[in-house]
């Protein structure tokens, strides 16, 4: 069972589940807790090998590392707490896991807020993945992670996000990083499926205007999918909830409240 934390609101029956990205942990959501806990019940999860979700080596050998298997880890937590359905907020790779759940278990998701969402890999990101696959077993993973973080979040105003994710990534083990990195082999067909098939779940893409690697494809998706909406935050990169938390919280709360009308 994954490590998780809940924040209960006695005046609400609605749950919001937060899913972080690769190398992160539930701690990246600390700027969201005060504002969103005033309105909803919150569930924060640490994914496999991240944060406080530490697996024994023997357990890791027996665990299947696929996007479906890892998304099922999240559903196991919801089952444990007896949450039948939830709103979901995710960032970066976490958005892929939420979309995976929307394909396999759409009844568990009331709405999705996908920030720094990934729906297509451009040439630079594909080259980055190939480079990482070549080097993942011979280069210390934290070197690769620092490189990836800088390429994805290159500007000075992205520094806080870079440092936060590198700090959290240091808690991973090399073998855990390699297991997660192997998931990239699933990305191309999975993302193609997400682009082609729209689920009838209200979806907000909350993107930074400077998220140059992923924003262009999100604009295309938001235009094609009728259940999707796009909000672009100025002067902001890949991790909107860290760089512009007040704007992120305001837009997210308004979107979630709209789903309850």
Image: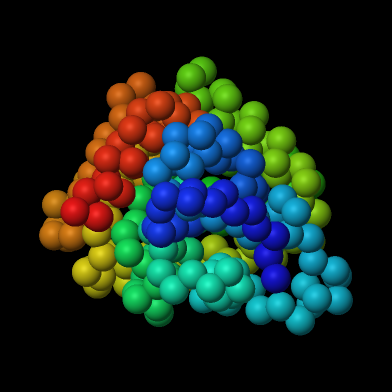
Please give left or right for residue 132 compared with residue 49 in the image. Answer: left
Q: Which is nearer the eye, 259 or 248?
A: 259
- Report if residue 168 is visible in the image: yes
Residue 107 coordinates in the image, percent (x, y): 35, 76
Residue 35 coordinates in the image, percent (x, y): 45, 34
Please give left or right for residue 201 compared with residue 104 in the image. Answer: left
Residue at position x 30%, y 36% from top?
251
Image vertical order of residue 74 relative to residue 251, above or below: below
Q: Which is nearer the eye, 149 or 170?
A: 170
Residue at position x 40%, y 79% from top?
104
Q: Which is nearer the eye, 132 or 8?
A: 8
Residue at position x 33%, y 41% from top?
253
Q: Which is nearer the eye, 234 or 29?
A: 29
Residue 206 coordinates in the image, percent (x, y): 33, 42
How many numbered circles does the render carry?
0
Q: Quadrant of residue 252?
A: top left
Residue 202 coordinates in the image, percent (x, y): 24, 59
> Which quarter shows the N terminus?
bottom right
- Report if residue 190 is visible in the image: no
Residue at position x 64%, y 48% from top?
25
- Colour convention: rainbow
Q: Quadrant of residue 65?
A: bottom right
Image vertical order of residue 76 relative to residue 207, above or below: below
As drawn, the residue found furthest toward the front would be 10
As drawn, the residue found furthest toward the top would be 156
> Which quarter shows the C terminus?
bottom left
């Amino acid at each position: 069972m994954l490590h998780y934390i809940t924040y209960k609101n006695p005046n609400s029956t609605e749950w919001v589940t937060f899913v972080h990205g690769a190398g992160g942990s539930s701690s990246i959501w600390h700027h969201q807790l005060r504002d969103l806990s005033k309105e909803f019940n919150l569930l924060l999860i640490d994914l496999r090998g991240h944060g406080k979700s530490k697996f024994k080596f023997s357990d890791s050998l027996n665990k299947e590392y696929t996007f479906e298997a890892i998304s099922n880890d999240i559903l196991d937590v919801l089952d444990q707490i007896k949450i039948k359905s939830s709103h979901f907020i995710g960032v970066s790779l976490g958005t892929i896991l939420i979309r995976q759940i929307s394909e396999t278990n759409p009844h568990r998701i009331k709405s999705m807020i996908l920030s720094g969402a990934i729906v297509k890999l451009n040439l630079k990101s594909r080259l980055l993945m190939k480079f990482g696959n070549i080097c993942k077993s011979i280069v210390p993973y934290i070197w690769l992670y620092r490189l990836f973080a800088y390429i994805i979040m290159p500007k000075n105003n992205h520094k806080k996000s870079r440092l936060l994710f590198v700090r959290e990534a240091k808690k991973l083990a090399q073998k855990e990083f390699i297991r997660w990195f192997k998931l990239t082999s699933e990305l191309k067909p999975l993302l193609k499926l997400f682009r082609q098939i729209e689920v009838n779940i209200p979806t907000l893409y909350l993107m930074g205007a400077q998220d140059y690697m992923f924003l262009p494809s999100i604009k295309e998706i938001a235009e094609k999918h009728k259940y999707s909406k796009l909000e672009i935050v100025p002067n902001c990169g890949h991790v909107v909830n860290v760089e512009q938390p007040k704007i992120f919280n305001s837009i997210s709360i308004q979107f979630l409240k709209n789903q309850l009308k």
